[in-house]
Image (cartoon, rainbow, N blue to C red):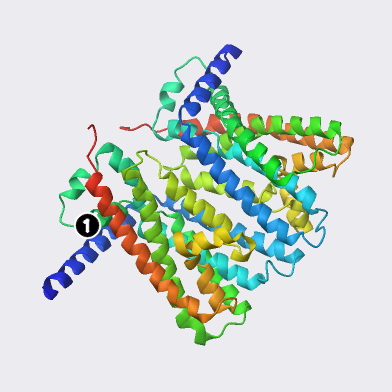
Amino acid sequence: MVRDKSLTARHVGGVYWRALVAQIRAITEYPADFWVMASAGAMWNVLQFAFITVLFAAVPDVAGWRYHEMLMLSGLFTVASGSTALLVDGVWSTGQMVLKGEIDYRMTRPAPVVVQVATTHIGMQGFGESGIGLLMFAYGWIGAGLSLAALPIGLLGLVCAIVIECALITVFCAVNFWIKGPMSNFAFVLVDLQSNAMVLPLGLFPIGVRIVTLFVIPVAFVNFVPVAVLTGHLSAWWLVGTPLAALAAVLAAVGVFRLGLRSYDSAGH
Amino acid sequence: MTHGFAVDRAFATVAFKRRLAYKTQWVLGLVLGGGAMLVSMALWHDLLADGALSGYDWSAMRAYIIIGFVTATVVFGAADWQIADRILDGHIAIDLTKPVDFQRARAAEYVGSMISTVPTVIVGVTGAWLLFDPPGPATATAGALTAVSFALVFPLAFGITYLTVLVCFWTKRYLGIMWLREALLGFLSGMMIPLAFMPSWLQAIAWASPFPHFTATPAAIYLGHVDTAGALGLLAAEAAWAVGLWFGARLVFRHAVKKVTVHGG
């Protein structure tokens, strides 16, 4: 049984990887589109970098957070957000596939439907986003005076941030199994609110917002908690919550997608 | 090719009704714009607690953020995708056979779709007014000139949007082009942070572009940061950009339309 499980995991991993490679090969056929999209992803975050820099020319801190700490906060979110475009961008098409009945033949294939849906597309903006995000995070890290000894915590935060973000977007896109529509509005609202609010210190917001982002929809564990622990704004104990939030988000994504598939009744019924 | 005003009105009405049919877009615009507005309020309430920064105190900033919400909702909620799709899927080949001016028809549709965002604006501004009690315009004249500035945002937004959509003649997708435009507009208009906070060289770059007229111009007039003569100068610049972009787009279109490709060759 153990052998079968490992083969299954390898098979799923193989399907996922081959599908992604196929998408990358497709991208190379349209170099102009690649550069426009990658530049757009980079531009948003260069301007976010500029926003923080301009702001901190006028103020010494925001709710106790200094310039380089804010860069880390923004950078880690950007890496996570950009990675979703590279790793699971296809989930944004869940609503359209449900409407058009395009889940049908994916259910007959010997691979998890969520993996097949997630790999139907790659968001080329993710290259620019992740690149600039990593730059911001690294620049903030050095500027904040963090040592290399903290690198394992940084890497744990980075991996968990990507996992949580991918899983949460999958959950919010899967809402379209029940609330039919071509647009993934719920996921779009999640990402938009995150990109506005979660690149700022949580202390700016009322207690209700803090509780929701920490314990209901754990977006605070994507970037705020890891960076707050690294920079000493939160106790190290909070770090335990980061992998737990990642595990919970993945279980929620798998569970919600399975429930969605159960309620899926193809098109035209 | 030119056509009558009745045709423009018909295009605008159809676009308006089409947008109204998707009521979730109203709610979505309110949640997205309202969310961004609340986040900005939280940030600047904290930063301006001890006094003014770069000429903005908490009272002025509340009005500034609401003005940014109004223009962002109207501009980002317009139907630019429909113009892009016509180029990308080849519908433009049919449009070119019709006895209507392509640019004017798209402008009418675009303005119609912008008007459809007004209910979202009204609900959002009313809510913000009740929650944050922003100051009124500096003078009655400033209030009237702010309204003129908002009105000029319609042709200005179309000019910038249409010019960037024309890039679709050379690309296969529109999303990245839209993001690039929105990123520049969000930053250089002062929606993200007032231009007064920026270093002088960056302010000069911003004011050399049409983007500040989306937020910085109406806000400066409303808050009385410029006198009446200054306000009229800003409005003249805004109008000049709208006219310049209109004719600039005609030149680009004349060249770009030679690149049109339709599915199947």
| Quarter holding residue A160 | bottom left
Q: Residue furthest bottom?
A: A149
Please determine whether, in this image, residue A159 is positioned above or below residue B88. Answer: below
In the image, B87: left or right of B143?
left
Q: Position of residue A118 (x, y in %)?
A: 31, 54
Question: Looking at the picture, which amino acid does disc 1 mark?
Answer: Pro
Quadrant of the image for the C terminus of chain A?
Answer: top left
Q: Which residue is mark 1?
A: A112
Q: Nearer the viewer, residue A11 or B127?
A: B127
The chain letter for the residue carrying disc 1 is A
In the image, A86: left or right of A227?
left
| Quarter holding residue A266 | top left
Please determine whether, in this image, residue A53 is positioned above or below residue B215. Answer: below
In the image, B239: left or right of A4?
right
Residue at image point 29% right, 41% down: A98
In the image, B13: left or right of A174?
right
Density class for disc 1 (Cα within 10 Å; few <14, some 14-19, many ≥20) is some
Residue at image point 57% right, 14% down: B3
Could you tell me if residue A119 is visible in this image? no
Could you tell me if residue B142 is visible in this image? yes
Q: Nearer the viewer, residue B257 or B110?
A: B110
Q: Position of residue A182 (x, y in %)?
A: 37, 39
Residue at image point 58% right, 61% down: A207
